[in-house]
Image: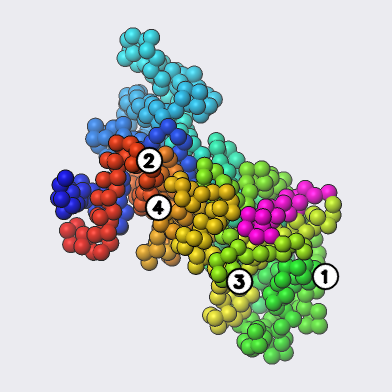
Amino acid sequence: MRNLEERYLDRLSDLYPTIAAASTEIINLQAILNLPKGTEHFITDVHGEYEAFSHVLKNGSGSVRRKINDVFGNTLSSRDKQSLATLIYYPKDKIAQVKKTESNMEDWYKINLYRLIEVSKRAASKYTRSKVRKALPKDFAYVIEELITERSEINDKESYYNEIIMTIIRIGRAEEFIIAISSLIQRLVVDHLHIVGDIYDRGPGPHIIMDKLMSYHSLDIQWGNHDVVWMGAAAGQLACIANVIRICARYGNLDILEDGYGINLLPLATFALQVYGDDPCDCFKLKGSDNPNRAEMELNMRMHKAISIIQFKIEGQTIRRQPGFGLEERALLHRIDYEKGTITLDGKEYKLLDTNFPTIDPKNPYQLSADEEDVMERLERAFTGCEKLQEHMHFLLSKGSLYKVYNNNLLYHGCVPLNEDGTLKEVTLFSKKFKGKSLYDALERYVRKGFFAVNREDCENGKDIMWYIWLNPNSPLFGKDKMATFERYFLAEKETHTEVKNPYYQYIENEKVIASIMKEFGLDFESDDTHIINGHVPVKRKNGESPVKCNGKVMVIDGGFSKAYQRETGIAGYTLIYNSYGLLLVAHEPFESTESAIEKESDIHSESMVIRRVVQRSLVENTDVGKELKEQIADLEVLLAAYRSGELKEKL
Ligand SMILES: O=P(O)(O)OC[C@H]1O[C@](O)(COP(=O)(O)O)[C@@H](O)[C@@H]1O
Ligand SMILES: [Mn+2]
């Protein structure tokens, strides 16, 4: 057995170019060993970043690239391999780009059709024919099947396949064929997709993501807090409607509502200009990218303030209407001294950064003004009557749930509420007590009642529970002691902004507690292939935080698809890939735009980098390929540790 140093240096030499290119402590494993069982991809907290998300789906989080490497290894230059990858991701755009310079398109089609067929053969090789048939796009299904399944009875394969390909080109259908076979490859590299919450809010295109998910071949969704607040809004829960509009205004995304969903915001805009027209609304500046159009930004800030005040009023009403929610502390407007322009919280008085509240009557601060009333009535009708929004929310209801157990993995967006001592926290909902799994089941029953209950009280409680799930400290999807929205707008003192996380986040590395949670959901901690997969809390990878928790039993995979979080995470989202060899965690580099990905074809845009492979011990022990893999993993762990310790740096 070569000593560790020699092995380490060997590995270093053949990984050196990859590491240098990746320029971060990421090691790009050459191939992901695929075995018969399906490959599942887990993605969370996409937060409306539809371009990056679409790109990740097209490249299968790096799986398409790996397939191309498997097939063409070093028989194609990396430039040709990347060009083929881009053709698979963006066939139409790539062909248009090639046409500008290619003198012999017929030849180009022939070469690339052969290459695409080889890649799809490899991608299909791990499947049965019937499974491939199900994945075939409707056009050219028969021809593609003929080309990728080598039927033994054909003796002169070469000329037979050549004839098929030349016919496709001759009848002028090469482009459509390329598009069809590219979509087949993309479908084959991901058997099943899990979206573990937070499709909505902050990014520009959650509605575009929803359209894409609705046409995806196989997926399930675990709702995130931002998804549930949109569900509440669609069900007509007024506090949810106000939160949805406020967050859209905060990120300059009101066009999602107006253009994406056709929800008329004119009444709110007119009201905002009337009431706050000469108010600078300084606390309501745009978060994220600046809007060059000054007038639009000014209007946005006024609408942002108008809907925020409405939200605080309506939330105060909801808190009084639902005393069982235990949120009295969060009704804040009656704690303001409107003369002095201060608020008293926990016995301490704070100056408000903004004291202009023209629509608040200090004697009855939660009362909506007549105009506010009118605006909310129209918005309620607009949200509940919006066909596209209802269609998207009903998709979430049919394909989604609050949690899911799938292939021995437990998926939920946020947490399981715990007490300080790590035991399951008991929560009272409408005077019944729930905890752990029963809390999740009860909350989900209410969400569905909010949409479908005939009994009026059940329906109203169901709607209010969606708001509860959005911000209650006992909500498994929120998991913080308060949502400090008011304080973050109106108070300078940072200590009022803190949101203390539920003890779950302290126990996330504690095997005993994680084992008890797994048991609660019917999973055995000791078994190799059981894991908990969460999102919700951005993993601060940049500061060395690992998404792998509790010795590989828990994965927190919010890697910051959302641009607003990339400063903290240092990357642009994770995909967790689960195949029979275990879990592979890939990180995505920040994605500029579709145009640049097509133009530059650079790996960094399209390539996902492997961060870490958590291989199932049982499989590794029992197969010789597994043993080789185990050695490779051991080497890579040494390498990674050395690289992290800086020892490797001087060698690079
Ligand atoms: O980033 P913003 O717009 O300030 O919102 C902050 C709010 O978002 C939350 O983090 C919830 O959103 P996430 O589920 O995306 O974390 C709250 O805890 C917090 O009050
Ligand atoms: Mn979340």
- Establish whether ligand 1 lies closer than 8 Å to the Cβ of label 1: no
Q: CA distance from mark 2 to mark 3?
A: 42 Å
> Quadrant where the N terminus lies?
top left
Kindly report which numbered mark, 2 or 3, lies closer to the viewer in this rendering.
Answer: 2
Q: Which mark is residue 370?
A: 1
Q: Secondary structure at mark 3?
A: loop
Give the extent of the magenta segment: 434-454
Question: Toward the viewer: 159 or 595?
Answer: 159
Q: CA distance from mark 3 to mark 4?
A: 30 Å
N-term-proximal mark, 1 vs 4: 1
Image x and y of residue 370, in percent: 83, 70
Q: CA distance from mark 2 to mark 1?
A: 67 Å
Q: Secondary structure at mark 2?
A: helix
Residue in the image at 17% along x and 58% along y: 651
Q: Quadrant of residue 146?
A: top left
N-term-proximal mark, 2 vs 1: 1
Q: Amino acid at mark 1?
A: Ala
Q: CA distance from mark 2 to mark 4?
A: 25 Å
Q: Which mark is residue 619?
A: 2
- Establish whether ligand 2 lies closer than 8 Å to the Cβ of label 2: no
Q: Magenta region's main secondary structure?
A: helix
